Every structure is written in C-alpha cells, then in structure tokens.
Image (spheres, rainbow, N blue to C red):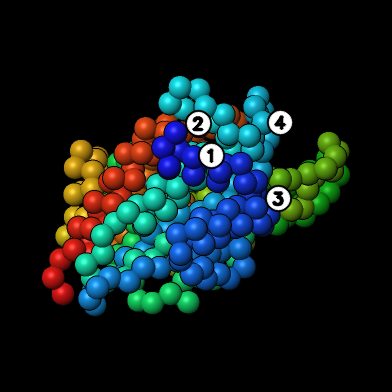
Amino acid sequence: MSGVAALVERLVAARSPSREEGPVVAEFEGWAQAAGLAVQGVGNNRWVERVGASPGPTLLLLSHYDTVPATAAWTRPPWEPTREGDRLYGLGANDAKGCLAALMEAFLAAELPRGRLLLVAAAEEEVGRNGFETVLPLLPKLDGAIVGEPTGLDIATAQNGLLVLDCVATGRAGHAARPHLADNAIYTMARDVLALESLTLPRFHPTAGATTCVVTVVQAGERHNVIPGEARWTVDLRTTDAYTVDELVALVRERVQSEVVVRSARFVAVSTPGGAEVLAAARAGWPGAVEFASPTLSDWAHLTGVPAVKWGPGRSERSHTADEWVELSEVEAAVGAYRRAIETFLGGSS
C-alpha cells in the first residue's frame, strides 16, 4: 500500500463529523509531528508551513477534514475504511479526505526554492462558522490558493455563491366557511412564487453562466378549516459575480408582496482570471484538466481577492452519499499533480 493510500485510510478511520473533529485533529497532528513540522491551530482547525530558501510568494493549500453525519443508508461501517480493487470506501473518503491526504503528501514532497507554502486542514466546512473563517485572519498575505475538493482532477476556475432569502406573506386569518372575511396568505405566497418563477437574470458569468433562483420551502396553515394569515417560504439563489447581493435582493423585493429577509449571504461567488499564476500552475500540474465552474460551495468562498482554483481527486456527485468512495489511483495521481503545481508556482524568480 502506498503512503498516500495508507494516509487516506487513517484519516477516514478518524471519525470527524462537523464540530466533532477531535480524532482527525489528533491524526493530523501525529502526521505533522512525524514530519518534524510545528502545528498551529485555532478551534479544531490546524495548519503547518514550509519556507523556501529565498523570499517569494505565499501559496495556500486548503482542504477540510470534517464530514457530514453518517446516515442510515450506509451499508458499510462509515468509519471503517474498506478497499475493493482501486476503490476506498468510507465516510469522507471522497469529500474531502482523499484531497487532504494528497495535499499533505505533496506538501512534504515539493521542492521549495523560494516563497512560503501553507497547508490548512479546516474544520466545520460542512456546517458552522468556526472553520477556515477563523484561520484566515491569522495567515500571512496569500498570493494564490489551491482548494482541495473532489473535481475528478479537473480545475474549477469559478464557484457559485449562495444567497438564502426567507419570505413572509401576511394576510388575515379567518374561518374557511367565510373566505370573504379573510385574506388568505397562501394566495399571496402563490402569486409571489409564480412571479419569481418568471424572474429573468440576463447577466451571465463567462464561465459560471446564469444566476439561478429557486423556491425550495413553503410553510402555511395548520388546519383544513382555518384560512392562514401567514405563509412562509424560502428562496435559494446560486449566485455568480455578475450580480451583487444587494442587486439580487432588490430584484426579488420588486417582484413580490411578501416581506423578504436575508438569511445568509456569507458565501459569495468567486472566480479566478485566466491569467492568474495559480491557474497556470494547476494547468502545469495536470495538463489534461478541463476547466469549469463549480455550482457547489467550499471554503474558497472565504478567499475573496485571492487567485485560487478548486481541484482534487474524487467526484462531487459522490459527496454526501451513502457508501461514498474514492479511487486510490486518482489520489496517487493528485499527489504528483499538486507537487508539480506547487513547484511551478514557487519555482520562478522573485
């Protein structure tokens, strides 16, 4: 078994649902100690660094070791990594412990003629506010970042943001036998939902495409014979940087009668221009990669202003699924790809 395959197994075996990352923190610290690295931390987040022989840019390697909870749909023990051929099964194998293991191995293997290399293993990426957000203010200025997430080793150069709106339609409650004396909040909500269905957002991001706007939750009424005076509904917008959050909120409010409140706007859309050095480095690391825009969230959302790519072994479609798995050969390939990218980014002249 290769070093990185054994490392993935150890990480998977270390139970780490969000906010309960203690076992995997200990595993990461043991790995760092064995490599002679000083570990820094805040909460359950940990990071290490290497410094090159001469001054130069700073490159961040970032992934996460927390997972979603195991569900009853699992047919295997979630924290007992099992191999079947090239596949390694286990909770977090795909999202994102395979990526993290490959980054850890590449972090040690890369030659650093200059600059600084940071590796952050983040907690609470799946949920919460005590993850990478708490680490970022403690880091030096970053010149580039590689975010380890399962992309099949293709390179995401843009990532959608998330805007969640909570809406409340207000009417007047009454008896179902006397609808003329009431104002049914469900009807107001229904008109608003249909108004948003026809909302057009014509500005496109060149890679990420259109912003999407979808009603995902509706709640109204408790009894068949009572006309509800209030109806609540939720809108999920997957954003690009073609629109600001304020613009999108204003467009929704113009369309509806309901009160609109922003529940979450913390995950902004991010993208990296085609001429960015970190993108050139990733291309050198895996020349056959396809470049694309990722619709799913990651800690890249917190790296606004830092040129970055989202890139790693595994497939996003397997994330959060029962019996998730990663191909060990792809994790092996990622070690080499990451190492070449690191050396390309930090190997130039100052």
Q: Amino acid at mark 3?
A: Ala
**Closer to the eye: label 3 or 4:** 4
Q: Are marks 2 and 4 in contact (CB under 8 Å)?
A: no
Q: Which residue is mark 3?
A: 231
Report the Cα–Cα distance between label 3 and label 4. 33 Å
Q: Amino acid at mark 2?
A: Leu
Residue at 46% from the left image edge and 66% from the top image edge: 37
Residue at 22% from the left image edge and 76% from the top image edge: 54
Q: Are marks 1 and 4 in contact (CB under 8 Å)?
A: no
Q: Are marks 3 and 2 in contact (CB under 8 Å)?
A: no
Q: Which residue is mark 1?
A: 9
Q: Amino acid at mark 1?
A: Glu
Q: Residue 88 bears which disc, if any? A: 2
Crowdedness near tag 4: few (<14), some (14–19) or many (≥20) residues, C-alpha within 10 Å: few
Crowdedness near tag 2: few (<14), some (14–19) or many (≥20) residues, C-alpha within 10 Å: many
Q: Residue 72 bears which disc, if any? A: 4
Secondary structure of the residue carrying numbered label 1: helix
